[in-house]
Image (cartoon, helix red, strand yellow):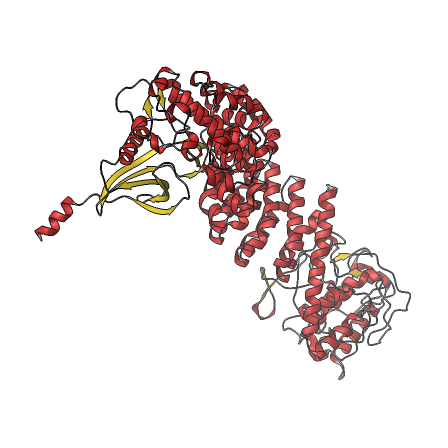
Amino acid sequence: MFAKLSALVSSAPSFPYQIGEPYRTAWGGWKHFQGTSNSDGSAVSIFRTSSTNKQDPKLTSARNGVKRLRTLRHPNVLSFKDTAELDERGETIIYLVTEPVTPLLDVLQTLDMSGPARQEYVAMGLYHIAKAVSFINSDCKLIHANICMRAVVVTETLDWRLHGLDLMTEHMATGDLPLMSASWMVGAQYKPSEIAKCEWSVIQQGPPWAVDSWGLGCLMQEAFNGQEMGSMEELRNTAPIPKPVLQDYQRLLSSQPARRLNPAKLAESSVLKNKLVDTIASLENLAVKDSAEKDLFFKRLPQAIPGLPLPVLRRKLLPMLAQALTFGGAPAVALGSILQIGNSMDEAEFAARVVPCISKLFSSTDRSIRRSLLESIDAYGKHLTQSVVEEQIYPSVTTGFTDSNAYLRELTLKSMLTLAPKLSQRTLSNSLLKFLAKLQVDEEPPIRANTTILLGNLAPHLSAATCKRVMLNAFTRALKDSFPPARSAGLKAMMATKQSYAPEEAAGRVLPCVAPLAVDPVPEVRHAALATLEAFVKLLQEHSATRDSAAGSSDAAGGAQQAGASGWSAGLGSNLGWALSSFGASKAKETATGEMSSSSNGNASTLNPPGSTSAAFARPPSPPRAGLQPPSPPQSSAGAASDIFGSSNSLAAADNDGWRDDDDDDDGGSAAPQEDADEAAARQRLGRLGTRGSATQSSRLGTGVASSGRQASAPASTSGQHVAPPKLSQDDGWAAELDNDDSWDSLEHKPAAGSAATNRPAARGRGRGRIGAPPRSGRLGASRTGSTGRGGMKLGAAKLSKPDEAFEF
């Protein structure tokens, strides 16, 4: 037990990083590995060197490099993260943990660049290394002593970083210097003459940049050539070096240390400053620019982007633009440049590089950035995944629904056309539709219209239950909007979603709401309403045809027989006949008389449409009611008829007789002969009309209002005689249709107040013309009102509409 405790106390601390795959090349005695942090899983680079001898000069130089890297901070010098020195199995191991980087040689071989684009990128990297060397030599008075391709690594954003500081030495220091004790670590092809000859005094007497200027020349040769040097003789090959840089390249490699070019002057010269370098430098110094300079830069940036290396745009410029927008350093127009760069990427790369930037920008409170994001949503919306939209973007976008700025509310509304299909049903129903319900009553008319349009487009993405609950209510609300485009949008939305409505909804809700817009004063709304009516009527016709085809052969035969009746409409007439003919099914095969009409000579009224051979609407007389007195004997003179019925412009009593078959027997009329009951009742009424001899006008029973119909020229018939009925005009089709409602005829009705029927003078006499008896209108149905009929049922008359209009149900 004590042995285990002592082992735990004496053991070295564990290394808190996971070491991954190694790279092919590394500087000096180090090995370069990929790695990840155990704490947060972030990527790192791990450099490792080891020796069995703790006093090995290699470990001493490594300790010097770790110390220098820890204390040296520069944008173009590798960033230090952590270090550890461990003893494992008799070896001393030094670990150096830095930001994730890749050897320069690997980057140059894998990047898809060539020609001028490659030269621009190499020039940018050399510019950054020259600035780092200038900082080390001029500001810190230090000598790196081994600048070459292996001493440069590249970050994820393609920035070059200087590392390999193991031989770093102070310029004027004396004694045992790292450069003196470990000069053997420098490759022979990179050694200037003073180091090769160990002339340390020459180094101290010369400028501090002399040794590193030679190293910059070697790096320039390797970078433009794309491979490591094998010997010093390769420095004489100037073919890979661009002509603008050739003169400075030769000055860097001067044989006299004092005449070598200062790296600071190289960084300040124009030979390494190209369009790419200027663009990157402007973005790096964006915080110190005023608003005018920023606006000018971002105005010119879209024109400069096509000429820049594509890998640099994707991995360097894009993150810098996103960072500048996130922290407020760039105006909102910079988003256009981000999307311009993203257009050159494939789906996977766009999702990996652009979508994270956009997701962060949506959380910004800057209205200009939100506006730019919403205006450009069509360019990147297709690349957004459902999880990103649901979890990151939509919660931030919803603030725009309630924004005080109307333009932002409208942009937010329009953005849902792209985002809503990627939302879950729960979010659509519980969140989005609530915002849209408020926007449909927004104070801005265009927003109301666009809300209706959006709802119409969202219908395919909503569940059937949600559509049934929301869509029709929203569209009918839009039809009542005072803004004509909003009404038009409601009509178009109904048209687009017509297949979602049941036939009952189309007939009971859609058509009644759309029909008033058929006379809208705005032509666009009027035309859209007519088109909508036509579409839904066609829908109902198709539904009817489907039901007809599904019916049995007997139903099909009955429908064909009814459709043959002249004077009826193909739609309403046949449907109404079918629906009400069932009440007289027992008389379906009996013949009937012609149409109802009245003449000045007292012609009889008929009960069925012309050409009809069916007696389905006839009905046997009802038994007489107790307590009613028989009517007075009919008068034969025309004057008496005038006294009974009043003027000829009033409703004819004969027409009321056609709807009151039961009252004939109740008033004491003679009993029907022992034959067909319906025909007997009709003859009885015709006989009474003939004895009265009243000249009356034909009545439109469909409207319940008197009309001046044609007068028949046939002679008056006497009681008990059958007279051939005259033919009704086509306008009398309503009367023929309403006769189909024969089963409702026994119910008593009172005329509605203010209707044309109430203007008829009271008739004199008994029975049909009792003095003071209220006038009767055509009866279409019964309702429970104050009056009481037979059997205790409370009856009432159907309300009459204006003249020449139909009954209101």
Question: Could you say which is closer to the camera, residue 188 or residue 633?
Answer: 188
Q: Could you tell whether 491 is left or right of 440 in the image? A: right
Determine the residue located farthest toward the left in the rendered image. Answer: 2
189 within the magenta span? no
Please determine whether, in this image, residue 1 is positioned above or below residue 795: above
Residue 612, can we see it? yes
Determine the residue located farthest toward the front in the rendered image. Answer: 197
Looking at the rendering, which quadrant does residue 808 occupy? bottom right
Q: Which range is magenta?
A: 709-720
Q: Could you tell whether 577 is left or right of 124 in the image? A: right
Residue drawn at (75%, 84%), measured in percent from left and top?
A: 674
Question: Could you say which is closer to the camera, residue 418 or residue 155?
Answer: 155
Please determine whether, in this image, residue 324 is positioned above or below residue 762: above
Determine the residue located farthest toward the bottom in the rendered image. Answer: 674
714 within the magenta span? yes
Residue drawn at (15%, 44%), measured in percent from left and top?
A: 10
Residue 653, can we see it? no
Q: Position of residue 628 (x, y in %)?
A: 66, 70
Q: Position of residue 494 (x, y in %)?
A: 64, 52
Looking at the rendering, which quadrant does residue 505 occupy? bottom right
Question: Could you say which is closer to the camera, residue 505 or residue 168?
Answer: 168
Q: Position of residue 93 (x, y in %)?
A: 26, 41
